[in-house]
Amino acid sequence: MPTVMELVKQLREMTGAGMLECKKALEENNLDLDKAVQYLREKGIAKAAKKQSRIAAEGLCTVKAEGNNAILFELNSETDFVAKNPMFSSLISNFEELFLSSKVASTEDALKIVSKGKTVEQLIAEATATIGEKISLRRVTLVKKNKTQSFGLYKHMGGKIVVLSVLEGDNPEVAKNIAMHVAANNPRFLDKQSVDPETLKNEEHIIREVAIKENEEAAKPKPAVVLEKNIIPGRLQKLLESICLVDQPYVKDPNITVSEYLKQNKTSIVSFLRLEVGEGLEKRVDDFAAEVAAQAKL
């Protein structure tokens, strides 16, 4: 007679469902493997598990604040069409409330939150089964501020890009303007001091290699000392200004920098966070010809 753990392992291999779901299914069905499979299929969990290998790089990001806490996260789907589904939108709204009320700080912890007897992970599995596409949660982040600071929230295209900024003082309008700027210009760092040494070293290396190659191909090459003391540092400085928020030309008035805009409003920025749908994920590329050829073989 197989042990419970052996049955759980076998059921997982058969259905692709999670360990806890498999254990519960076996317990509910007196360790009968066939009935447990049927149980998981009826619950939609086995069906959902079969979709886990699909690429979910579409969807929406969201940001919501309440008091001194703000939550940001991304809910992915396989297609942009599903992101407009009412069930998908309802799931996001539900998660916003759940994550804020529980002050969850990571995706792993968010998946374990229980709502009306079901974990967030189970709710996502059910949505995957009902909608017919893989749904996945990632990049859940909790941001806190103190009472003297302001949140700035901005959503672009309904959540394709979302930004949260934190500013000193009671400046919600300025904070929102900064969030809008971040959405448009996508700075990588807050300021030059925030740039990590590895990034700085890598960018300087690239600039040096390009400068040396250009100089070698130039009609009148410059002395190496000019490259090292003027051209390379100058290009590095220009690059830093383009990737650091406070040094970028302010989106609503390019004649001033973000830093100058903040000074005009007697405030400063503490932090910012920007999420864009599908960042770092492989995008699905549908090959219609290959799909038709595959179907023809059936």
Image (cartoon, grey):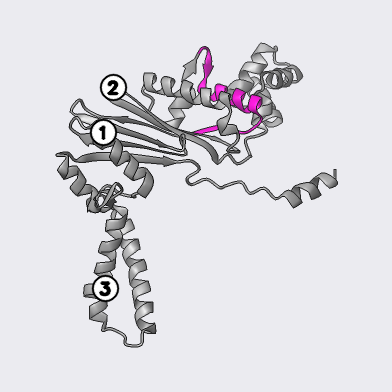
Structural crowding at the residue carrying mark 3, measured as other residues with C-alpha within 10 Å and reported as few (<14), some (14–19) or many (≥20): some
- Residue 67 circle label: 2
Mark 2 near mark 3, Cβ–Cβ under 8 Å? no
Structural crowding at the residue carrying mark 2, measured as other residues with C-alpha within 10 Å and reported as few (<14), some (14–19) or many (≥20): few
Q: Position of residue 203 (x, y in %)?
A: 34, 62
Q: Secondary structure at mark 1?
A: helix
Mark closer to the chain start, 2 or 1 = 2
- Residue 231 circle label: 3
Q: Which residues are magenta?
A: 116-138
Q: Position of residue 210 (x, y in %)?
A: 37, 73
Q: Residue at x 46, y 34 (%)?
A: 158
Residue 136, picture quadrant? top right
Mark closer to the chain start, 2 or 3 = 2
Q: Residue at x 66, y 30 (%)?
A: 132
Q: Mark 2 or mark 1: which is in front?
A: 1
Task: Report, in whole angstroms, how far the alpha carbon at label 3 lies from the one at label 1.
Answer: 40 Å
Task: Report, in whole angstroms, how far the alpha carbon at label 2 lies from the one at label 1.
Answer: 16 Å
Report the amino acid beneath label 1.
Glu
Whether residue 248 sits left or right of residue 105 in the image: it is: left
Mark closer to the chain start, 3 or 1 = 1
Does the magenta segment cover residue 133? yes
Report the amino acid beneath label 3.
Ile
Q: Which residue is mark 1?
A: 173
Q: Position of residue 288 (x, y in %)?
A: 73, 49
